[in-house]
Image (tube, grey):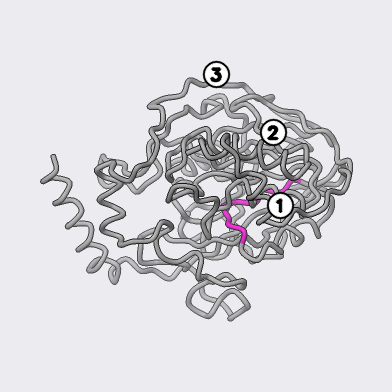
Amino acid sequence: MLATLLFVVVALGLAITIVPHFLDRIYYRGPKSDHFNGQRFFNPDGDADTQGLPGGGSRAGFMWNQLTGRDGRPAWPDWVPVTQGRPPARVEGDRLVVTWIGHATVLIQTHGLNIVTDPIWSDRTGPQLGPMRFGSRRVTAPGVAFDDLPRIDAVLVSHDHYDHMDRPTLRRLVERDHPRIVTSLGNDEVIGEPGAVALDWGETTPLAPSVSVAVVRAHHWGTRTASDRNRALWSGFVLVLPGGGNVWFAGDTGLGDGTWPAEAAAFGPIRLALLPIGAFRFVPGQMAIGSHMGPVDAVEVYRRSAAARAIPIHWGTFRLSYEARDTPPRLLAAAMRCTGQTGFAPVEIGVPTEIAPYAARMPVAAVPRETLLRCLDTDEVKAMR
């Protein structure tokens, strides 16, 4: 077994060195901007924290530790039972019903539209080679069975990582429903499906006479083949609604300069924010990495956005990092207590959740990160792996 794993690691190491030159592709051509240099996209607030391995060390060592299970990460359950839900066919008017399907996949129903974010119904998150699919394995079934999913009108795809852009799922949706796919620059080429519209940060497109979607900044990166790094843009989305407040799907993001929540809020009051809180720990005690924010940063993003309510996503479905499966929501609850905030808490997977119209929260003073970390320096938090 160890000999086989060693062969795999060596083969992968050679592939990383030799193959990339043959896999690099151009997904987008356009004018230079403050986040595109004519060839690749970049974060205007800096890319130093999104480069290199999140836990440090060599790529070969990182892969070896993952393959052999010697990285010290806490065990996840093999399977978590889920009672799959059945959302309504449509939700009319200003009513807003959302269903967390798992990971970053959320069904948003309002104004007669059914919209799904970063849909993935596949069992694994990686590439497919022949009959084999690689990547992290799902530990919860989708909260809604694909056949119970109502007709989808629009799909929002934040970037090209496999756990967010699942081409088999997109193909099924296109074949069944012919939805409009909205994504950020270059990703339409990766998706390769008709009806994909690719926009830059700050641009909007209509979904219905009174409903539009805006593409907004996130702090992340993209790749599909390990050599096409940042050839396509990453983003979040604001669903701009005529009444009741907007919905902000932050996509996949780290904190960066922390000013991008205000860019989302500039489109109007946020009724609901969908904020990632998982895949943030790659060494013991780590609270965030450059491209993924943990609960410590997510509570500040929630405060800065002035959203009336937030639901945590990007946790508990696929094991992508080192924290235990239940650490993100438990740490979120502790961070919310330390910051004196309310309204940002998990929902049960597969359960349609009615979201009240926007009502401004009482303002809460910012808690400096160092102060928040001191508040979290407890035996309860230290026990969270």
Graded by Cα atoms within 10 Å as few (under 14), some (14 to 19) or many (20 or more), the crowding at tag 3 reads: some
In percent of width and height, residue 331 lies at 60, 39
Q: Nearer the viewer, mark 3 or mark 1?
A: 1
Graded by Cα atoms within 10 Å as few (under 14), some (14 to 19) or many (20 or more), the crowding at tag 1 reads: many
Residue at 52% from the left image edge and 42% from the top image edge: 174
What amino acid is at disc 1? Glu
Disc 3 marks which residue? 83
Tell me if residue 93 can be seen: no
Element class at badge 1: helix
Left or right of 46 in this view: 167: left
Q: Which residues are magenta?
A: 247-255
What whole-number distance in Å separates the C-alpha atoms at marks 3 and 1?
32 Å
Element class at badge 3: loop
Left or right of 71 in this view: 319: right
Left or right of 46 in this view: 18: left
What whole-number distance in Å separates the C-alpha atoms at marks 2 and 1?
23 Å
Disc 2 marks which residue? 98
In percent of width and height, residue 314 lies at 55, 42
The answer to the question of whether label 2 and label 1 lie on touching residues, with beta carbons closer than 8 A, is: no
From what the image shows, is residue 358 above or below residue 51? above
Graded by Cα atoms within 10 Å as few (under 14), some (14 to 19) or many (20 or more), the crowding at tag 2 reads: many
What whole-number distance in Å separates the C-alpha atoms at marks 2 and 3?
16 Å
What amino acid is at disc 2? Val
